[in-house]
Image (cartoon, rainbow, N blue to C red):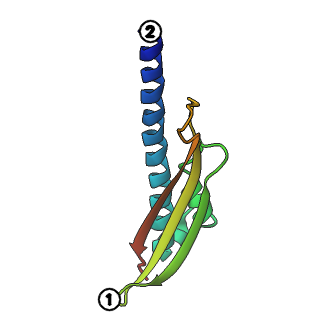
Amino acid sequence: MVPFLLLLFVIVVDFGRIFYFGQTIENCARAGALYASDATTIAQSPYANVTQAALADATNLSPQPTVTSSTGTDADGNPYVRVTVSWTFNMIMRLPGVAQSVTLTRTVQMRKVE
């Protein structure tokens, strides 16, 4: 019974870690989009670019996540910025038939304020 409970515990811990790091990646994407969406924020921010602004929330992630950004115009003619942050999460438990790593990707799109 103890090995089964230990296995269950490790699986629960891994899913908790996935949730935690997923939230961290979401916060990074949101911070990057917020930085890039407002010219006033860019002028007053301590960060030099979108990547630095996004990675400010990822100090606990190693290696650092990948940050990409793009701009465009939505269907209503409003300009927007889209920031995507990706990071590979490695599981603690190595089980046959179960993925050893999961790529966490979050995208946030915000309307640009001019």
Q: Residue at x 44, y 35 (%)?
A: 15
Q: Residue at x 57, y 33 (%)?
A: 96
- Rate crowding at label 2 as few (under 14), some (14 to 19) or many (20 or more) other CA atoms within 10 Å: few
How many labels were placed on the picture?
2
Residue lying at 43% horizontally and 65% vertically, measured from the top left: 108
Instruction: For marks 1 and 2, give the one nearer the viewer.
Output: 2
The label shown at residue 2 is: 2
Q: In terms of secondary structure, where does tag 2 sit?
A: helix
**Looking at the figure, which quarter contains the N terminus?**
top left
Taking depth in this image into account, of 36 and 72 the one nearest to the observer is 72
Closest to the observer: 73 or 11?
A: 11
Residue 24 in view, yes or no: yes
| Residue 75 location, quadrant | bottom left
Q: Quadrant of residue 94?
A: top right
Q: x and y percent of residue 107 in the render?
A: 46, 63
Residue to which mark 1 is pinned: 76
Q: Name the residue type under label 1.
A: Asp
Q: Nearer the viewer, residue 93 or 35?
A: 93
Looking at the image, tell me whether mark 1 or mark 2 is earlier in sequence order.
2
Disc 1 is placed on an element classified as loop
Q: Residue at x 46, y 47 (%)?
A: 22
Q: Tell me residue 91's x, y (percent).
A: 56, 35
Question: Is 111 placed left or right of 18 in the picture?
Answer: left
Above or below, 21 against 94 in this view is: below
Q: Looking at the picture, does residue 100 appear above or below residue 4?
A: below
As drawn, which residue projects farthest toward the right?
63
Does any portion of residue 46 appear in the rendered image?
A: no
